[in-house]
Amino acid sequence: MNGCGPFTNVCRHRGARLLEGEGNVGNAIRCFYHAWTYGLDGGLQSASLAREWFPDLDKGGLGLRPAAVGVWETMVFVNPDAGAEPFAEWLAGAPASMAALRPRNAAAHAPGRLVELADVSYRFGANWKIVAENFIDGYHLPLLHAVSLADGDLMSQAFATAGRHITFYRGLKPGQRHDNRVWPVIAGVPADFGAAYIWFFPNLAIFETAASWSTFLVEPIAPNLSAVHCRFFAMPQAMDRADAWPAIPDPLPPYVLSAKGAGAGPWIDARGLHPLQTRDVNCEDIYACEAVQQGMESGSAEVGPLSRWEANLTFFQRQILDYVSPSG
Ligand code: FES
Ligand SMILES: [Fe+2]
């Protein structure tokens, strides 16, 4: 980052969002609106027409607001609250907690040696917390996904918590192995590795299979709408098979907001089937989340009893309550 940032992306003049997308800003950040200009250190360099309009402007107090930053594996975590708890404290040993659940003979996935195959954003017509709760719900795996996850040992699940985060592992059924056809097995990871994840509070998961390492970021858009941004990484040799992968459908089906990358096609079901007939995990999960949202909106929903495999939901809800209204 060469001493630049991170800063909140908000102009100190009238609060406009400063930059969009990605790219190189050069030597300065200039607001498109009234052309206030900030240096890479965040300081306000100039306010346009200052001599006429702001003769007494105190530029020293009008720099971009700093944000907090932390780095883990290949990922940069930015918190717009510079006074937030230190990153290492927030991480709270979650990676070690997941490592303890994984099979002992499994090497780390080490995402830094993998290549990004796909970047797909899904539309979930549901509150972001419903999406989160679906992700950490172990009870629905052998039920809603009985066919789509048929190779999984879904009746044996291990989970733990670390800080505000949740970790999880489940294997494959005895005798099942990753079939190695679409993506090659990651070096050092056994072919019978099932699925492991860390649900980072509040809205990010990293997810591992024998052949992939991916991120799942839930972005709240509206009280009843979320975008889920998934990025998929695999061994570089996966690209040798790119010709055999399904193309990105055009037009995209309504449940996909955007799709980029050679490996995006395999993650999108475009047959137009009812979601419960697709045998596609994502379609099934989107359908489930939207159904829960609809139930909640009906005014008839009540909280029912939760199974042992939904203990993660109770934990997650406690974190939300504690975060918005700390008990201690
Ligand atoms: S809002 Fe940025 S210069 Fe006015
Ligand atoms: Fe699911």
Image (cartoon, rainbow, N blue to C red):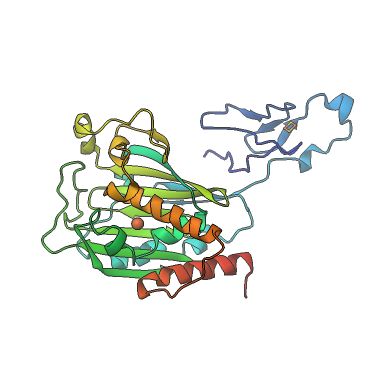
Q: Please report the residue visible at 23 percent of the width from the left and 58 percent of the height from the top.
A: 194
Quick one: 136 or 97, which is closer to the camera? 136
Quarter location, residue 190: bottom left
Q: Please report the residue visible at 57 percent of the width from the left and 32 percent of the height from the top.
A: 20
Q: In this view, does 181 lie above or below 178?
A: above
Q: Please report the residue visible at 22 percent of the width from the left and 65 percent of the height from the top.
A: 104
Q: Quadrant of the C terminus?
A: bottom right
Q: Is residue 153 above or below residue 126?
A: below
Q: Can residue 93 be seen in this view?
A: no
Measured from the top left, where is residue 123 in percent x and y?
45, 43
Q: Quadrant for ligand 1?
A: top right
| Count of picture labels | 0
Quarter location, residue 231: top left
In this picture, residue 125 sits left or right of residue 240: right
Q: Determine the residue located farthest toward the left in the rendered image.
A: 175
Measured from the top left, where is residue 313 in percent x and y?
45, 68
In this picture, residue 212 sits left or right of residue 41: left
Q: Is residue 179 visible?
A: yes
Measured from the top left, where is residue 236 in percent x and y?
24, 38
Q: Please report the residue visible at 58 percent of the width from the left and 61 percent of the height from the top.
A: 85
Quick one: 295 or 146, which is closer to the camera? 295
In this picture, residue 248 sits left or right of residue 256: left
Quick one: 255 or 227, which is closer to the camera? 255
Measured from the top left, where is residue 181 in percent x and y?
15, 42
In this picture, residue 304 sits left or right of residue 150: right
